[in-house]
Structures are given as structure tokens and as C-alpha cells.
Image: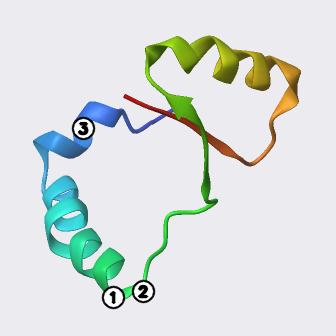
């Protein structure tokens, strides 16, 4: 069995190829979009419990963000 560990990308040529070579330009031109759009729960660490309540209530295919 084989797998890919998250730390592997920083130690080989794949990480720089994605995060320095491809992604910045693709995001800037709109060729690659982060999806789905984020739902901002609120601002500040005090809003983290609200975000956790939403997660426990059932979130599907959404990004919840607490801006700090």
C-alpha cells in the first residue's frame, strides 16, 4: 500500500511546482478558482463556538471561516 503524506510535497519538486509555479498565476487569471465560496461565520476567536455549532448541525460542501 502506498500513500501521500502532506509533508511530502514540501520535500520534493511537486510542492514548488504547484504552489510557486502553477497556483499563483492560475488564481490571478481565474483559470483556477477555490470552491466552494466561503461562508464567513464572524470575526474574532469568540465566534469559533458559533462555527463549531454550525458544523455539528450539519454542513455539507461548505467552507466555514472565522476571520481573526
Around disc 2, counting alpha carbons within 10 Å, would you say few (fewer than 14), some (14 to 19), or many (20 or more)? few
- From the image, which quarter does the C terminus lie in? top left
Q: Is residue 54 left or right of residue 14?
A: right
Residue 23 screen position, x and y as percent: 28, 70
Q: Which residue is mark 1?
A: 29
User: Disc 2 versus disc 1: distance between alpha carbons?
Assistant: 6 Å
- Identify the image quadrant of residue 58: top right
The answer to whether residue 23 is above or below residue 10 is below
Q: Which numbered mark, 3 or 2, is in the foreground of this view?
A: 2
Q: Are marks 2 and 1 in contact (CB under 8 Å)?
A: yes
Residue located at (22% from left, 60% from top): 19
User: Disc 1 versus disc 3: distance between alpha carbons?
Assistant: 28 Å
Q: Which numbered mark, 1 or 3, is in the foreground of this view?
A: 1
Residue 6 screen position, x and y as percent: 34, 35
Q: Which residue is mark 2?
A: 31
Residue 48 screen position, x and y as percent: 56, 17
Q: Nearer the viewer, residue 31 or 18?
A: 31
Q: Which mark is residue 8?
A: 3
Q: Are marks 1 and 3 in contact (CB under 8 Å)?
A: no
Residue located at (16% from left, 42% from top): 10
Around disc 3, counting alpha carbons within 10 Å, would you say few (fewer than 14), some (14 to 19), or many (20 or more)? few
Residue 49 screen position, x and y as percent: 63, 11
Amino acid at each position: 500500500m502506498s500513500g501521500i503524506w502532506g509533508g511530502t510535497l514540501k520535500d520534493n519538486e511537486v510542492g514548488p511546482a504547484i504552489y510557486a509555479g502553477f497556483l499563483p498565476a492560475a488564481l490571478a487569471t481565474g483559470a483556477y478558482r477555490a470552491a466552494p465560496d466561503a461562508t464567513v461565520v464572524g470575526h474574532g476567536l469568540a465566534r469559533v463556538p458559533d462555527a463549531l455549532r454550525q458544523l455539528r448541525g450539519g454542513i455539507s460542501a461548505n467552507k466555514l471561516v472565522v476571520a481573526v
